[in-house]
């Protein structure tokens, strides 16, 4: 069965519906690995929710989205518009003078989002240059769809809203504004304080993963090997630390399953962490269970503790 994402269907769908109802102007984010569901499937789900736009990560992610009846918005700016074929209805993000010049040189009739620099200092025009960038794009033949403000996560929810409010002064009044990283309360306050401005909000994890109790990642046990202290096992010929069992689990680096940052194993069984015998391989991992501890059998599943934004399940099981 490989690596399986188990979903409590009714609870998950109720969670998603509740989030959608709380955020007018919601633009679902389906970027990367599609939050564990896959970009194509998640785009289909977003359309079923009534979305007319979805946000993808890069121009290279459009293949799973462009054939569906929705407008993809690329969140990451690109300097490869001279070599990558981009569908005409894809909306591109521009966040610097270099990117602006590149876009006007290679796709001057594009529809674009202009990003405003926030405290993250990642992408964006300095606030005092936003209006000039909008004018240059329009004069060059581009259609400016909106401005985008992306605050970081370090500050409080209220502080994020305050930062957005301060940056709004740099955005021409006729432009809609797309924001992110706000809770429903602060988003409502922002919209109420700016009744003449059209807002949208991009949500990814907060939409698809808000209640993690609805999602469970598990991997199937393929084989079990009895071992004694001092035996050698694994690709790297490591020494087994004691009597017990080596358990072969059907998840590895090809699935995005790796040890935690502190080196701990991501695998659990019977509410106990299973120690890695060695680092995960591409499609399987080897864990050691000491004699006397609860030991999974072939065909059993073990829990996998990894972020779904960087994990590629083999299948999704709806319950």
Image (cartoon, rainbow, N blue to C red):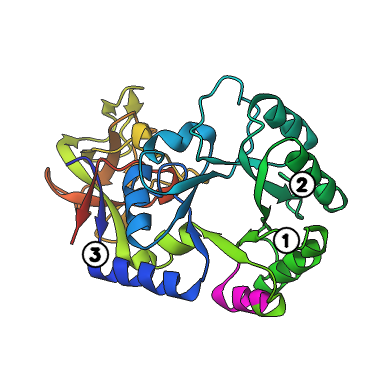
What residue is shown with label 2? 134
What residue is shown with label 3? 9
x, y (%) of residue 95?
72, 42
State how far apart marks 3 and 1 are (Cα): 41 Å
Specify which label sits upstream in the sequence, 2 or 1: 2
The residue carrying pointer 1 sits among few (fewer than 14), some (14 to 19) or many (20 or more) residues within 10 Å by Cα, namely: few
State how far apart marks 2 and 1 are (Cα): 11 Å
What residue is shown with label 1? 174
SS for tag 3? helix
Residue drawn at x 42%, y 49% is 70
The residue carrying pointer 2 sits among few (fewer than 14), some (14 to 19) or many (20 or more) residues within 10 Å by Cα, namely: many
x, y (%) of residue 187?
61, 73
Q: Nearer the viewer, residue 60 or 284?
A: 60
Residue drawn at x 82%, y 64% is 169
Q: Nearer the viewer, residue 77 or 315?
A: 77
Specify which label sits upstream in the sequence, 2 or 3: 3
Q: Are marks 2 and 3 in contact (CB under 8 Å)?
A: no
Q: Nearer the viewer, residue 136 or 261?
A: 136
Residue drawn at x 24%, y 64% is 9
Specify which label sits upstream in the sequence, 3 or 1: 3
Q: Nearer the viewer, residue 276 or 319?
A: 319
x, y (%) of residue 285?
30, 35
């Amino acid at each position: 069965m490989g690596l399986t994402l188990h979903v409590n269907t009714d609870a998950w769908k109720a969670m998603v519906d509740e989030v959608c109802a709380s955020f007018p102007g919601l633009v679902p984010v389906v970027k990367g690995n599609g939050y564990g569901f896959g970009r194509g499937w998640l785009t289909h789900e977003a359309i079923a929710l009534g979305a007319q736009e979805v946000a993808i990560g890069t121009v290279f992610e459009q293949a799973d989205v462009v054939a569906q009846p929705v407008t993809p918005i690329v969140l990451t700016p690109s300097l490869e518009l001279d070599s990558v074929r981009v569908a005409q209805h894809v909306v591109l993000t521009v966040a610097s003078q270099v990117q602006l010049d590149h876009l006007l040189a290679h796709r001057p009739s594009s529809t674009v989002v202009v990003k405003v620099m926030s405290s993250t200092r990642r992408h964006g025009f300095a606030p005092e240059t936003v209006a000039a960038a909008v004018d240059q794009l329009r004069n060059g033949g581009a259609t400016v769809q909106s401005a985008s403000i992306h605050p970081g996560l370090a500050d409080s929810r209220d502080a994020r809203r305050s930062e957005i409010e301060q940056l709004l002064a740099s955005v021409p009044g006729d432009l809609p504004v797309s924001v992110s990283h706000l809770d429903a309360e602060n988003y409502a306050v922002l919209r109420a304080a700016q009744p003449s401005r059209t807002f949208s909000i991009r949500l990814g994890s907060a939409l698809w993963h808000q209640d993690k109790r609805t999602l469970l990642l598990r991997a199937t046990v393929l084989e079990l090997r009895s071992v004694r202290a001092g035996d050698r096992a694994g690709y790297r010929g490591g020494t087994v630390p004691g009597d017990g069992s080596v358990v072969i689990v059907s998840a590895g680096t090809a699935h995005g399953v790796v040890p935690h940052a502190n080196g701990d194993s991501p695998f659990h069984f019977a509410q106990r962490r299973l120690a890695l015998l060695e680092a995960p391989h591409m499609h399987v991992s080897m864990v050691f269970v000491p004699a006397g501890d609860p030991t999974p059998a072939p065909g059993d599943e073990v829990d996998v503790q990894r972020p779904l934004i960087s994990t590629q399940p083999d299948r999704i099981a709806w319950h």
